[in-house]
Amino acid sequence: MKITVPKHIGFIMDGNGRWAKKRLLPRSLGHREGVKALKRVIDACIDYGVEYVTVYTFSTENWNRPKKEVDALMNLIREFKDKDFKNEFNKPVRVRFIGNIDGLPDDIATAVKEVELSSKDVKDFCLVIALNYGAKDEIVHACNKMRETGVVATNENIGDYLYTAGIPDPDLIVRTGGEKRLSNFLLLQSAYAEFEFLDVLWPDMDKKDVAQIMKDYSKRERKYGRVK
Ligand code: IPE
Ligand code: IPE
Ligand code: MG
């Protein structure tokens, strides 16, 4: 079977809490295991030749979780930012963040900007980290920026005002954990994306699941409103 590789995949990494609960572990350990799955999935995507992977790490609604869990997630992000993105994955990785970065704790907001700057010249692969991200927040932010600069919105220019400016729209959105919803992830950008909902819990994701995703995607016919 001929494999068609999507240029950009978005992952809604869901199921960390349930993975931990099944093992009678604290939810924070599920998130920690989720970081390991992230590395496996990114390496597999790099090997297939995917150019952009966007991962949903923390939504604007996730602040409503218990403080202990929010703190554990922020601490994981603190650890992640210290990684050496030139050597962490199968290839050097450019990292971009999307979301309300100024709404994060100061040390994380500063680190985010440093990681983006230090990896900005990497060409082949871009990891986009959605952090304190919500599509509604993104659209409101874009509208306000357009109003401030007196720009009239068009189908063509709206993308330039989103957090994802310069990043092609995702071809495929994958959600693990069995729920079939977007939870405020890339609402505009996924206008013509394909969707894949997997029952596998995110910390269990591995290369085989990525291979299956590629096979399923290869069977899709993308029509963009046209007749083939
Ligand atoms: C997704 O896993 C990770 C984040 C939202 C940060 P969850 O923590 O939502 O896991 P479940 O859905 O409770 O299993
Ligand atoms: C979506 O998962 C957010 C992330 C994966 C970061 P949630 O677990 O927060 O979504 P809901 O609450 O089930 O819709
Ligand atoms: Mg969840």
Image (spheres, rainbow, N blue to C red):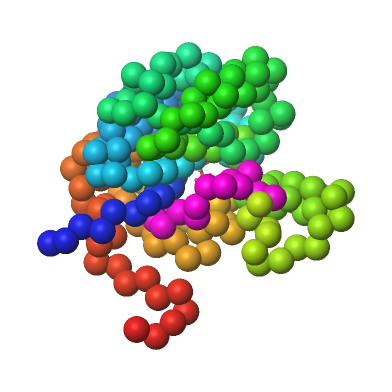
> Would residue 185 be visible to someone looking at this image?
no
Label count reads: 0
- Residue 148 image point, x, y percent: 87, 49
| Horizontal arrangement in the rendering, residue 66 relative to residue 54 (left or right) | right
| 212 is higher (above) or lower (below) than 55 | below
Quarter-of-image position of residue 215: bottom left
Quarter-of-image position of residue 23: top left
Q: Residue at x 50, y 55 (%)?
A: 169
Q: Residue at x 37, y 51 (%)?
A: 7
Q: Residue furthest left?
A: 1
Position of the N terminus, as image quadrant, is bottom left
User: In the image, is residue 16 part of the stretch drawn in magenta?
Assistant: no
- Residue 205 image point, x, y percent: 28, 38
Of 103 and 202, the residue lying toward us: 103
Magenta segment, prevailing SS (helix, strand or loop): loop
Position of the C terminus, as image quadrant, is bottom left
Q: Residue at x 38, y 44 (%)?
A: 51
Q: Residue furthest bottom?
A: 227
User: In the image, is residue 172 part of the stretch drawn in magenta?
Assistant: yes
> Would residue 86 be visible to someone looking at this image?
yes
Q: Residue at x 30, y 68 (%)?
A: 220
Residue range highlighted in magenta: 161-173
| 217 is higher (above) or lower (below) than 48 | below
| 26 is higher (above) or lower (below) than 195 | above
Quarter-of-image position of residue 206: top left
- Residue 25 image point, x, y percent: 36, 22
| Horizontal arrangement in the rendering, residue 103 relative to residue 45 (left or right) | right
- Residue 66 image point, x, y percent: 59, 27
